[in-house]
Image: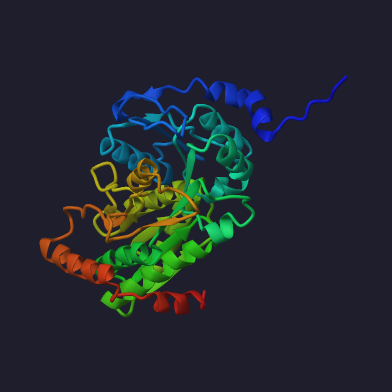
Amino acid sequence: MMKTNLSRRDALKLGAGALAAATALPLAACGSGSGTGDASEEKSSYKVAMVISGPSMDGGWGQGHYESLKRACESHPNWQMLEPKENTATSDAATAAQSYVDQDVDLIIAAGNEFASAWGEVVAEAAEQNPNVKFLMTNTDPEVDLADYDTVQNLECVQTNLVQTGALAGVVAGFLSKTGHIGFIGGMRLPTTLTKYAAYVLAAQQINYQVQGHYNFEAGFTDASFGTKLTEQWIASYDVDVMWGDASAVDNGARQALEAAGADTHFDIAQPIDAVGDSQPTVVASTVIDWMIGQAMDEVEAGTFGEGKVIEANMDNGGVYLGTIADKVSDDLKAQIEECVEQVKAGVLVTQEDVDTFKASL
């Protein structure tokens, strides 16, 4: 009896997850049509899909990516968006990506670098067998996260200007804190998290040099009750009155503690979506990220996408910005905040050198 050697691609196609994923329906709101998978043909329509580790409407990370994708589709009517694969475990990530490859999806997006280690073989096989299929990974450093990849010719990454993001939050915190004590919760002690926190505190201290920062970099991303308890502790011990977070569901817990302490005196700065509204009484502003998916689509259409290039989301290209400021903030204070926002954009309020020095002390 002959033994047949299956490639990873073939093995994944046999998986139940891939068979179920093949039935994914397109979202009509983002155009129509499908790719041909033939690089020799001039294409008039394209398909795009996204894999997310959590729900797409989580009020944070997943929703930020989902909304960025929807905006990109709205400005690119010749692109058809397939239903995203939500709540994808790392163990299922390769199967999820392969199912999209098998549908000749033109652009497959990983919402975060957590799938980088799982997608290497899928990316390599697609480069050889499905050259029209491209991959975009957000929050990913190719030199670190993709060091073991055999090829990046069909892949690009998106990185955020974290100094700008943190500084925008710090400006708001510096103006709104009455006690001079501000808090930050991070899901993990990552270099990106440390950069955000450093820029946050440094910018706040440019507004009020007496500001002190309080942090936790190991909160995880799912336990809202931890965020509530930690924020309650900081309020009781240090009189913290402004919070900014990088911990998804944990941030929601922090907002509950702030609201219990008084939504008119205790404030939250949201990220990465614009969350100001009646449903979030403590949120006074948001640091918003657009994941530059539209630029990636343009490059796919132009035939210039790939080779491991990095797209930076920043204030110049609209990838980073300060969202709506709540009505509870006075017009005079809003004007002062906006003035400092321009200094953040110009790179003069907080510098990368300042951030690196601060991070070394953490």
Displayed quadrant of residue 125: top right
Horizontal side of residue 228 vs 127, given as left or right: left
Q: Nearer the viewer, residue 44 or 317?
A: 44
Quarter of image, res 204: bottom left
Q: Residue at x 52, y 65 (%)?
A: 191
In the image, taking residue 175 as reference, residue 91 lies left or right, namely: right
Q: Is residue 252 visible?
A: yes
- Residue 92 position in % (x across, y down): 61, 35
Q: Position of residue 77 (x, y in %)?
A: 27, 32
The answer to whether residue 261 is visible is no
* Picture layout, residue 229 above or below residue 95: below
Q: Residue at x 59, y 26 (%)?
A: 18
The residue sitting at 52% across, 77% down in the picture is 360
Instruction: Tell me: residue 347, above or below residue 327.
Output: below
**287 and 187: which one is in front?**
287
Residue 133 coordinates in the image, percent (x, y): 49, 37
